[in-house]
Image (cartoon, helix red, strand yellow):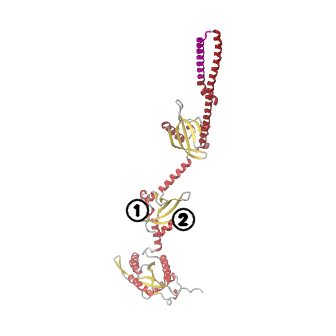
Amino acid sequence: MLAQAAWTSVAPREVWRIVLLYVLFAGLWIWGSDTVLAWLIRDPDRMSRIGMIKDWLFVAATAVLLFGLIARLVAQVNAALQAAQTHQTELLSTQNRLQATLDAMPDLLFELSADGVIHHHHSSRADLLAAPPERFLGRRMVEFLPADAAQVCQAALQEAAHSGSSAGQRYALDLPRGRHWFELSVATMKAEAGDERRFVFIVRDVTERKLAEDQLELAGRVFQHTREGILVTDAEARIIDVNEAFGRITGYSREEALGRNPRLLSSGRQGADFYRQMWGELLESDAWSGEIWNRRKSGEVYAEMLTISVVRSPDGTLQHYVALFSDITALKKHQAELEHIAHFDALTALPNRLLLDDRLEQALTQATRRGNTVAIAYLDLDGFKTVNDRHGHAVGDTLLVALATRMHEVLRHGDTLARIGGDEFVAVLIDLEDAAAAEPLLQRMLRVAGEEFPLAGLCLQVSASIGVTYFPQGRAVSPDQLLRQADQAMYRAKLGGKNRFVAFDEVLDPSARPPPSPP
């Protein structure tokens, strides 16, 4: 095949050249030699002998000439044959490289004519084909592709026919392995004059990319539309992104926050120790969660539930901090209200019995540690029932509020005045040097309790009976026992004429003594 191709490429031209040279040489030889001999020799016999010699010389000369021309022709054929072999080797190598490249490509390749008919295809992934090759070769795309996919391919074909190429078109196919997304690129093939115009379709499976894009899109929607504020910083704690909720909660726009440190939200309520502990836990466990008080752009302080997470690269390098937070100011306010309801009297806003027990326990512990005295005063109003019966409970409640306010004002900071029910109050007086130090405070309470109260056009007046006991005592005594002792002393103050205070006496009230310790 190579010899034939080489001969075909060289022989016609060279053969004609040999023929022409031979004719020219032979004609010149015959004409020239005969003319010269006729001019030089007149003898016929001699002319015959010389003519014979001339003919053998002609044979020898033409043999040399033909040998040279044929040798030259053979050399040219060999050169053409060698060039053809080299070209064939290069062509085969190029074909092998092209085939290897095609086999290595994950893409599907198709050659189509302008009418959408598929003429050739190449694919290393038969599982991604919409149909076996024998079913679509020689057929138009619309005959085997779903309508929406065929429409996309037809639009890409038209775009390539108009502008020379098309890229980025996508369509989906429901294959046995599930739904797959494909991205289409189309280019026009170079064609010789008069040849039918063809197009190359490159189809790439982008299912994983599509799923990743969908996940990113979903993450973006969640990031922007979640009600919690989100803040992202780089490794140096510079803000690189925030969501819409961040602006709604803090009052800072995205442009105002980018590039700044989250310290712009600091309220100053947490000290350096708080942040030192927070950062230590964050860097140790890559996460921190807790409540924190921050400040809005308006200056308003608000409470937030904050979670901070560390984002690291695959090699463990810290890349980002992500903070997720929600405004819990209303919740904290509601909790405070519930705690207030649980611990404070609804009418007078004084501590109730529950908080009184806690305050008394703390006072006794502190007195034991410091070696000072605590006075527990049990107060009951004299004549309050008459006010209620005569003027109604509304007036009585108003009087209780006013009286509680006045008695609280005469106590010191750290003392506790609690309402434990009806017109009964308990005062816990702390940091006393001795029992006598409580007397001025008790006298003040008696004085303000007995003052007149102008309320609702009335001039109301009551008094108080106070029983007081002290801690520490000679034996161990519990908070409940102390309250019972003060209650007993208050009862004696009532019996003694009211409007006075009486100290508890173990001799007079043996029933209030603490039980003996077990042997």
**At which x and y percent is residue 161?**
50, 36
Q: CA distance from mark 2 to mark 1?
A: 31 Å
Q: Residue at x 64, y 18 (%)?
A: 57
Residue linked to disc 2: 284
Regarding mark 1 in the picture, which secondary structure is present there?
loop
* N-term-proximal mark, 2 vs 1: 2
The residue closer to the viewer here, 90 or 478, is 90
Against 394, is 66 above or below?
Answer: above
Q: Horizontal placement of 499 versus 126: left or right? A: left
Q: Is residue 56 visible?
A: yes
User: Which SS does the magenta portion mostly show?
Assistant: helix
Amino acid tagged 2: Glu
Residue 367 badge: none
Against 429, is 249 above or below?
Answer: above
Span highlighted in magenta in the image = 17-42
Regarding mark 2 in the picture, which secondary structure is present there?
helix
Q: Horizontal placement of 119 versus 300: left or right? A: right
Quadrant including the C terminus: bottom right
Look at discs 2 and 1 and give the one toward the viewer: 2
Residue linked to disc 1: 297
Name the quadrant containing residue 34. top right
